[in-house]
Image (spheres, rainbow, N blue to C red):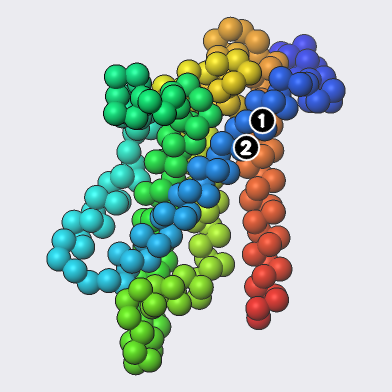
């Protein structure tokens, strides 16, 4: 055990090239996927929070259900879509970082939309009557409430990032865990543990924890600074 810890510290101290490459790919894929999730999920969640239409409760129920969608199922569906015989096979995305972005975005988007819907619904309960008295339509109320709750929505973004960067099932299916191409922190940790290279697995695990802490710290600092700036 002591030898494993020494080797782990050594890998981190010398900035092991393999560790850095895997960490950079994981961060790039997850941030891209979360950006897509936020771009789609926030407007969708706000719309479901303020709009009233037939079938709305069904859509909300489906959205909440998709929050717990098994990642391996998402990976399987995307695999079928992106395989050579699938409808999107001509894009050539299977076993590429693009496929992993799609998988993580598919998992992050329902989470963002569901959490946003709850945040906006709570704000609508307090400010909705005032906004309606100003003659704002549902889309305009949604935009106003998104702006009003922008600091609260940072937590939603962090939850999506945590879901994306810690994912293994879907990215393993559509990415293939190809060395130097589609190997992420989580898939590499699983592989290296099975191979018995515990020092590398532990180093990757520490990097993963460090990235999550770093992103959360940066978000907290930006949120605090923005809150002070906007009073």
Asked which quadrant contains residue 42, the reply is: bottom left
Residue 27: give its label: 2
Q: In this view, does 185 lie above or below 191?
A: below
Q: Which residue lies furthest to the top in this view?
A: 195
Asked which quadrant contains residue 195, the reply is: top right
Q: Distance between the residues labelled 2 and 1?
A: 6 Å
Residue 218: give its label: none
The residue to which callout 1 is attached is 23
The quarter of the rendered structure image containing the N terminus is: top right
Q: Is residue 93 above or below residue 146?
A: above
Residue 215 relative to residue 174: left or right: right
Query: In front here: 170 or 198?
Result: 170
Tags 2 and 1 in contact by the CB under 8 Å rule? yes
Crowding at label 1, few (<14), some or many (≥20) Cα neighbours within 10 Å? many
> Which residue is depicted at the point 66% across and 81% down?
231
> Which residue is depicted at the point 56% across and 23% down?
182
Query: In front here: 66 or 33?
Result: 33
Q: Position of residue 145 (x, y in %)?
A: 44, 75
Viewer can see residue 25: yes
Residue 7 relative to residue 114: left or right: right
Query: In front here: 7 or 140?
Result: 140
Q: Where is residue 6 in the image (x, y as percent from the top left)?
A: 80, 17
- Identify the secondary structure beneath mark 2: helix
Q: Which residue lies furthest to the left in this view?
A: 54
Asked which quadrant contains residue 81, the reply is: top left
Q: Position of residue 155 (x, y in %)?
A: 53, 57
């Amino acid at each position: 055990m002591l030898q494993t810890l020494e080797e782990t510290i050594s890998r981190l101290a010398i900035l092991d090239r393999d560790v850095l490459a895997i960490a950079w790919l994981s961060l790039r894929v997850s941030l891209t996927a979360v950006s897509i999730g936020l771009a789609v999920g926030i407007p969708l969640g706000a719309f479901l929070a303020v709009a009233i239409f037939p079938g709305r409760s069904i859509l909300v129920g489906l959205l909440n259900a998709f929050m717990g969608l098994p990642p391996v199922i998402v990976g399987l569906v995307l695999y079928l879509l992106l395989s050579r015989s699938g409808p999107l096979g001509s894009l050539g995305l299977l076993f590429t970082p693009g496929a992993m972005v799609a998988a993580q975005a598919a998992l992050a988007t329902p989470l963002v939309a569901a959490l946003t819907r709850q945040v906006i619904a709570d704000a609508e309960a307090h400010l909705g009557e005032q906004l309606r008295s100003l003659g704002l339509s549902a889309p305009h109320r949604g935009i106003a409430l998104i702006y009003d709750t922008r600091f609260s929505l940072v937590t939603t973004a962090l939850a999506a990032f945590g879901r994306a960067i810690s994912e293994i099932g879907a990215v393993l299916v559509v990415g293939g865990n190809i060395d130097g191409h589609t190997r992420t922190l989580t898939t590499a940790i699983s592989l290296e543990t099975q191979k018995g290279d515990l020092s590398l697995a532990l180093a990757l695990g520490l990097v993963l924890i460090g990235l999550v802490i770093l992103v959360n710290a940066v978000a907290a600092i930006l949120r605090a600074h923005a809150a002070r700036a906007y009073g």
